[in-house]
Amino acid sequence: MSWILAVDVGNTVTRLGVVAAGEVQAGLRVPTAAADYADLLRRGLARLAPSEPPAAAGVCSVVPGRQGLVEETVAGLGAPPVVVGPEAAGGLTIAYEAPETLGPDRIANALAAWERFRGACIAVDLGTALSLEAVDGRGALLGGALFPGIRAARAALEGAAARPIPAPRGRTWRAIGRDTGEAVAAGSGFGFPGLIEGLVAATREELGVPAPAVLTGGGVRGLARWPVSIDACDRHLTLRGTALAAARSAGKNCRHPGA
């Protein structure tokens, strides 16, 4: 089986994925801050990887302190890792004014969205940060928006509050919270869908077209309702974009990842 290894090193979780026939066939997660991270990564790759070496390997890392270790470990599988960035963007044109400051996960998300829609599009990632990327009809990543994610926003509120904020009991979605924990849950659960709606609408207005939007990220589970402006959800968006960048940098063909 011809396959591509994709590694997404996030602030909270490192995701490993085996991409074959245009789909993420298998995957696992490793806590990025784990004390035994190197051992967990090696054991995870040994368990996940097929017997033959990958046709290509891609690394998308927003954690500089982990990137070297990940690259070295991935290289041991037999394919030099391609690091997603402005120089390895899978054919996207980077129109960001300071491309060196553009997070590789934002590039990977934009690339996967472009491959999916093949036209002006929007990628929204609700993770540690809420990030939005806008791609125009010529495949140029123009930029986007950044905002604290759900956990980061709650942590900021707790840090600024004079009193401890209790966690909500269970998951009862009410816009009118009946206690402080519920009120905080309502603020994020209903507030973030509204935030996404507003950002997508403003981005479409600036693009000048009703560009489709795809949503990804672990924070999606913390939403009380679905943002109606979102056309698709793809939990593997970053892995797909990482695999695409790796395949194209390695001169391989990678079929449309699909929904």
Image (cartoon, grey):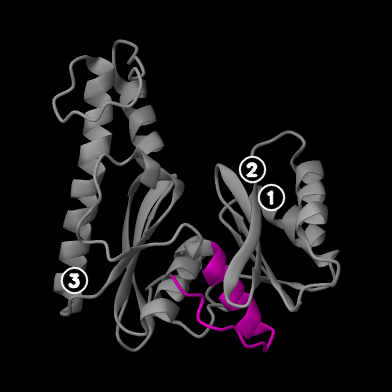
Query: Residue 85: x percent and y percent?
Result: 55, 71
Q: Tell me where residue 244 appears, x and y as whole percent.
A: 57, 77
- The residue depicted at 35 percent of the width and 39 percent of the height is 222
Q: Residues within 10 Å of mark 1 (few under 14, many from 20)?
A: some
The Cα atoms of the two marked residues, 2 and 3, are separated by: 34 Å
Q: Is residue 234 positioned above or below 192 on the image?
A: below
Check disc 3 and give the amino acid type: Arg
| Residue on which disc 3 sits | 204
Q: 13 left or right of 43?
A: left
Identify the magenta region. 239-259
Q: Element under label 3? A: helix
Instruction: Please give the label number shown on residue 66.
Output: 1
Q: Residues within 10 Å of mark 2 (few under 14, many from 20)?
A: many
Name the mark nearer the viewer: 1 or 3.
3
Question: Image point 64% across, 43% down: which residue?
Answer: 32
Camera-side mark, 1 or 2: 2
Within the image, what quadrant is residue 26 found in?
bottom right
